[in-house]
Structure formats: structure tokens, C-alpha cells
Image (cartoon, grey):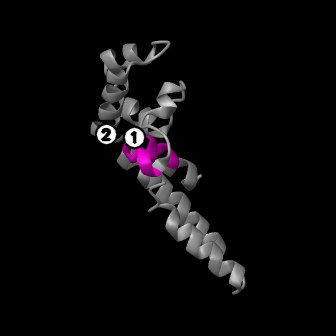
Amino acid sequence: MAFQIIDDILDYTGQEAVVGKPLGNDIREGVFTLPLIYSLDKNKDKIMLELLKKESYSEEDIKQIIEFVQQNGGIDRSKMLAQKYTKKAFDKISMLKDSPSKQVLIEVTGKLLYRNY
């Protein structure tokens, strides 16, 4: 779950050259992810709600939606949820007996929150 949430965040904050897709790609495809949902939960802006009803979005629309998400806590709230899932993963991993596989799980899980690709 944390991996997917971070992926959703990167759609609003990542660098196209690093992420491998343009910012707002999920929006272009009509996929409304957690950062947008959280932002709308905080601010039910009527103009934004109307904008999101469109069949397709211009580059200016995409920019407006990205700014809306960045300004209304969608990124921060999503990061907090990703942190909770990562902590749960670490708690489960800690129950495993020590092994090289456990160490790999610890390393991979630790990198989830800080990936930029």
C-alpha cells in the first residue's frame, strides 16, 4: 500500500525525467488518487469539482488540479498514511527470524517513503 500511495504522490510532485511519466498522468487517465481525494475532503471547492467533471483536461487544467492538491494537504496527508503502512510492514518484518531475506525486506521497506521514481 505504501508503495502505491507514494506512486500517487509522485504524480503530483515528481520530476518527469525521474518518474518516467508527466506530472498529472493519473488525472489525464481519469484516475483520481488519494492525494486528490484527501484534498477534496478538506476543500470542496465548487470550481474544482466542476473542473473534475470534464471528459478530458487541458494542460492548464492539470496544472490547476496539481496546485489544488499541493495547497490543500493532499500530499502531506497521503504521506502520513504511507508512513503508517510502512510502520505496519516494519512491525510484521520484525517478527521474522533474522536472515538475509529479512534484511532485504528491511532495506526495501525503508526506501519506500523516500523513493522519487
Numbered circles on residues, count: 2
Q: Nearer the viewer, residue 50 or 19?
A: 19
Q: Are marks 2 and 1 in contact (CB under 8 Å)?
A: yes
The residue pinned by badge 1 equals 12
Kindly identify the amino acid type of the residue bearing the numbered disc 1: Tyr
| Location of residue 59 in the rendering, given as x and y in whole percent from the top left corner | 36, 23
Residue 47 highlighted magenta (yes or no): no
Label 2 Cα crowd, 10 Å radius (few <14 / some 14-19 / many 20+): some
Magenta stretch in the rendered image: 7-18
Given the current orientation, which residue lies at the most extreme bottom position? 98
The residue pinned by badge 2 equals 70
Q: Nearer the viewer, residue 100 or 43?
A: 100
Kindly identify the amino acid type of the residue bearing the numbered disc 2: Gln
Q: Nearer the viewer, residue 105 or 89?
A: 105
Task: From the viewer's perspective, tell me whether residue 85 is left or right of residue 71.
Answer: right
Residue at screen point 47% across, 60% down: 115
| Location of residue 41 in the rendering, given as x and y in whole percent from the top left corner | 40, 32
Residue at screen point 44% across, 56% down: 116
